[in-house]
Structure formats: C-alpha cells, structure tokens
Image (tube, rainbow, N blue to C red):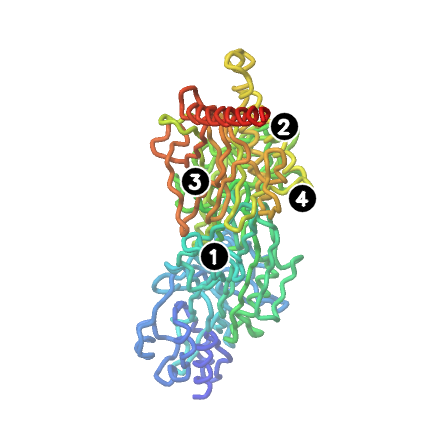
Amino acid sequence: MQKLKKFLSLALVLGIVFGAIAPAMAAEADVKTETVTLHKLLMTKAELEAWDSDDIEEKGYDGTQDRTALGEIAGKTLSEIPNVYFAWQAKDEDGNWKYIKADGSIITDDPDFTLDAFTTAGVFGMLTTADGAEFNTSTLPQDAAGTEYRIVEVKQLSTYENADGSILADSKAVPVYITLPLVNESGAQTAIHIYPKNTEDKPEIDKNFAKENGLLNAETAAQILGGADYINYEAAKEKASAQVGTIVPYEVKTKVPAGTEYQKITWNDTMTNGLTYQKDLVITVTPTGLTLDPATDYVLTEDDRGFTLALTEAGLEKVSGFTKPVDANGLSTGAGEDVEFTLSYSAKINGNAVVDQADKNNITLEYGNNKDNEILEKEVTPLNKELQVNKTWSEGTAPDGVYVTYTLKDAGAVVASVTLNGKETAGTKYTVGDGITFEVTGPYSGKFVGLDDAKTYTISERVGGYTPEYTESVAGSVSVKNNKDTEGPEPLNPTEPEVVTYGKKFVKTDSSAEPVRLAGAQFVVKNAEGQYLAVKTADQTSAEATAYEEAEKAYQDAIAQYNAMTVEEQASQAGLDLKASIPTLKADRDAKFLIAREGYNWITLTTAPTETDTQGVLVLTSNDLGQFEINGLAAGSYSLVEIKAPTEFAILKDPVEFTIGGGTGTTADNIKYELADTDNTALQVVNKKVTIPQTGGIGTIIFTVAGIALMGGAAVAMKKNKEEDAE
C-alpha cells in the first residue's frame, strides 16, 4: 500500500512518475501500456495551489480514470486545454534527455522549434485536443523492470491562446516523468490517463506621462498627475497642452507575473511625427536582484520616432529564473515572484506638430512562446533623390489603429524616420531628417525626398504584431507587405497619452466696410506674464536658427521690395516675377521655421522690441493677402504687439489680445483666412489709414478759428503799442 501511495502521489503532483515495479508483478512484464492519454488541465492559481494529491488518491485515483471519472473523484468539473504540444523524450547514453521517435529511437540532434522540423525529424509528439492527446505507446520499448520516459511541453509549438491573450503559466506535473509499463495495485495497465496541470496568465502594461511632468491638461489647465498604472490600461489618458520645443517625459510599466515564462518579450514604441524621441531610455527592473546587461540581455534599436526593446534568450532566462524557478528535474517550484519593468524616456515636441492635432506616443508589448523576429532590413537606392514606399497588408485592408514607422539608414546610421497611422491626407509633408522630407502618397505609403542617388540605403519598419515582407525593390521604389503574426497572442497596447499644440491665424486689413487686406505689417507675441516669444539665436541653436533667419529675411525683403514698387512697376514683368517668387520664398521660410521653431522660448525684455531692434524676438509679417499666423503654442492667453504698420497706416497703440486652447477657450474668428474658406477661420486685425485733414472739413474750421483768434490778438497788441508810442 505504501508503494501505491507513493506512486499515486507522484502521479498527481510531479507528473506520473512510475518507479520500480514490485517483484510480485513481474509475471505481467509482457503486458504493455498500449496508450497514454495526456490531458492538460486548466486551473486558477487558487485551484492549483489547493489541489491535494493524497486526498485524490485516497478517494480512488489509480491512473486509469478518464477526465470525467477524475472529476467525480475530485468533486469538480475539470477543464481541459486543447492545442498544447507535448513530445516524448528518453535518455541517451550520456544520460541526457533527447527527443525520440515512435519506436523509442533517439533523435540525436534537436530539431528547430517549428512544427515542420519536428514532423520531418519524426518526433513522437502531438497537440492536445479538447479530449486530450492519445499516444500509441505500443511500439515504445517497455522493459520488465520499467523503461523511463519524459513528456515535455514544447511551448514554441503550442497554439493555445485564451481570447483575452492569456497563455499558459505556472504548472504542476510539467514535465511528466513516466515509467512504462504502468503497474498499479491491479497490475499492469494497458491504457492510462495522466493530468499535467496549468494556470494561465499574461503580462500587464500601462503607459502615461511620467509622474513628474510639468504639463497642464489641455482642457482644464490643471496640473497633470502622471504615472503608469495597470488599472488604466484601457482608460483614456489625459491630453497635455505644450508648445513646440517642450520636453515631454513618459513612463511605461510592465509586469511579468509569477509562474510565467516566455520566449519573447518585446516593446515597440512609436511616436507620431510631431514628437522626437530623445534617445534617453532608462530601464529599471524589480526585484533588485535581477539585473540586465545591455551587452547580452537585450537589444535596443532607436530612431527619432521611437525604439524597439527586445529581451534576448539570456535576458528571458534571467526573468523566468525569478518568475518561474524550477528544481533539478525542471519542475516548477511554485516560488515565483512578479518581475516589473519600468521604462522612462522623453520626447521633444518638434516643428512637425500640427495645430489642434494631438501627437501620440504609442507602445505595444509582444510576448508569447514564439521567439522574437529580428528587425528585417532591405537595401534600397533612390532615383532622382526620391524613394517611394508602397504598403500592402496580408489581410487585404489596412487594420485600424496601427502605427507604422519607416526608418532609413546610411551605412548603419539612421538618417530619417517617419510614422504613419494610415489616415494622413495625401500631400502631407514632414521634415524627417537632415534635409530629408517625407510626402504622404496614400495610406501608410509615401516618398522620402532629398536623398543621395549615389548612396545605397537600408529601410526597415516598426509595427507591433506584423512582420515585413519586401515584395519589390527597384531604383526609387520599394514595396512592403505586412504579414500578421498569427502564432502568438495579440500585442498588448495600452491607451496612450496625447500632447497638443495650438495656434491662431490672423488677417491684417484696413477699416473700410469692404476690408482691404494689407501686407507688410509686423507683430511680436507676448504671453500673459509679459514675456516675448523668441526663436533661440544662432549662438544657441546654430545652423537651424540661422537658416530660418536668412529665409525669413529673404521673404520679408521680397515683400518690401514689391510694396515699394509703383503700380506700373508691379505690372511689369519684373514686378510680376517678384510677386510670383514670394510664395516660394514663404514655403522655404515655413519649412525652415518647422525646424527652427523647436527653439521656441520666452524672454523678458526691459524695453519693447521695435522694427529696427527686434532684440531676437520672433517677428510675424503679413503677406500680400494680409495673412500671418502663429503655431506651436500651449493653451493660454496671448497678445500681438504691432512693431511696424503697413505703408500709409497708423501703428496700433494697443495689443491685440487672443486666447487659444481647450480649457481656456478660444478667441472667436471673424474673417476668412483663405478667400475660398466657407467659414471664418481667422481673427481680423484692423489698421486705420493715416490721413491729412481735407479743405472744408472740421480741421479747416479749427484752423480758421485759431487764425482769427491769433489775428485779433495781434491787432489788439499793435494798437496798444501805437498808443504807448504816442505817449
């Protein structure tokens, strides 16, 4: 009875481990165990911990009961897991466990972890079904003294996945150690059932602004309380308001729960084009005893639009050593603990930020039992300094809510990166590298412009849950098909925090009933604290600011030159050519401004800026349609101060107050910015013309009255003088 008790206990707790066969049963040595049916039971953590093998044995379990019968003994309905792959092993001459074929022969070289490789090698294994996996063991050697085998779970070949993305976690009786034939108190058994048990679990992740962020809510203007928190995985995060040039700090927390082990843990961080990743990632891991070596435990790939962080095999082993420690036989000790990663990094709001359009920092976590794919790169060559990138999807249509980042490298160094969400308008342009722009041509498609035709670049993409396939590549063009990763659970994707900038459009006009739009007015911008908006000087940001200043000067000089022409000169070919050049100069100025305005800052001046001494303050100039605008500001109240009026007009004495943003309200528009606009889209700024009083007007009356008074006074004085002389 003690031997049976020992057998049954091992069968239920450690996987059915059948030891030495009692001499009294030797007569049945010629009886083989013909079938072994493996049932993968799914339990909650509490159920797994509460499973009492001794109690189950006392109630009659002897290794022959099917799942229904075992459930009756245990007094509960047992749930079985399909699509879990198990394979048989035996020890080789050196005592190492190796995969075997159905006849028990050793497979000396372990196959790659693909179903095709296991099938080709003839591995004795299969996936479980809803009723278990029935192995025909009649061809396996089964000595009279018992032949020992091990049945292992091959997670890389398992396709089980719960609807919520949970995969198998902590276990009992995995791997299964078994001695054939099975002999119990009733003798050798031809058919037996074994029951390895598992819980299921999945990682947790959340992303938010860092706890200490210095940001204000775009709607309420209240201080944002950041910090990642798993309970907010699906909750809407706050939207921050900030100006171009602001550094935005982020925090990502990821918990790998106790009892789990994975073959892949990869974070893909993707920022929209109005954000520039600062390449300042700091990784913190708890428990404190777990340290990751950047040289061996993970691979970090970075560009301006974000990063990919992937744990290596060595790093994954370190993590599972804490989450799921095992004993000498590879069995879970049940003493695992949670491992938590905290990723801290930041992004700068750059010149690509679009007014009123939130920029997002999205992250996905890929995890599971399939090893991570390497980042695939493709060599490409531009044509006419351009490279067209065309995108297709294995599903036929683009998925919703997916971000794709394309990265170009020159000799291994990143030179440009762009993020697309598939909803950009064709023709939208982004500054994505030094002298390189990207123009959207369709959903997730577009062209890099400004490349060197003499160079060969490499292109790669970053998108959670998909693998790129480069289907076509010729000079000036590359086609990329995205294949969905169907072997693992859907990547975890927490809601992302957003940051938005604001702006305002203005139109400069005269005061007539049918307003005439005026060119050449110049303004500076003040905030509520009385500071002036400036772009950092060349000494601070060097070439970018200098390039903007030169482009701005060229634009303003052209406007001034055209305005100084007579009507006849403006109608001449030279005048027409000059007028035609102004939009081109403006486009060049705007492009350089997108880059330079990352240097926005507020400065305090003791004297107000003037037309001749702007003191480094940003100057806004109305064009020939009276248009000018300011972009990239945080929500708040501001004012325009005119430092130069249009020719023949009086300069405004009072500032023009305006408010932008959600929580603080927005100053109403009262004029069309573009003549073709349907609605009012700008704020009108009115100047009055400087005039000389006309004959017959009130001015004449004033001067006439004053003259008569002076003449009368003079006459009285002369008469008095004569009287005095006569005396």
Labelled pair 3, 4 in contact (Cβ < 8 Å): no
Tell which circle, 2 or 1, labels the residue nearer the N-terminal end.
1
- Identify the residue at horizontal 43%, vertical 28% (top origin): 510
As drawn, the residue found furthest toward the front would be 727
Disc 2 to disc 3, how far (Cα)? Answer: 28 Å
Q: Which residue is mark 2?
A: 453
Q: Which mark is residue 677?
A: none
Who is closer to the viewer here, 273 or 339? 273
Q: Which residue is mark 3?
A: 422
Who is closer to the viewer here, 713 or 120? 713
As drawn, the residue found furthest toward the right would be 539
Res 192 → quadrant:
bottom left
Nearer the observer: mark 4 or 2; the answer is 4
Q: Which residue is mark 1?
A: 157
Q: Which residue is mark 4?
A: 540
Residue 140 % position (x, y)? 48, 65
Per the image, label 3 sits on a secondary structure element best described as loop
Nearer the observer: mark 1 or 3; the answer is 3
- Identify the residue at horizontal 60%, vertical 47% (top origin): 603
Labelled pair 4, 2 in contact (Cβ < 8 Å): no
Q: Is residue 135 left or right of residue 109?
A: left
Disc 3 to disc 4, how far (Cα)? Answer: 37 Å
Per the image, label 1 sits on a secondary structure element best described as helix
Q: Amino acid at mark 1?
A: Leu
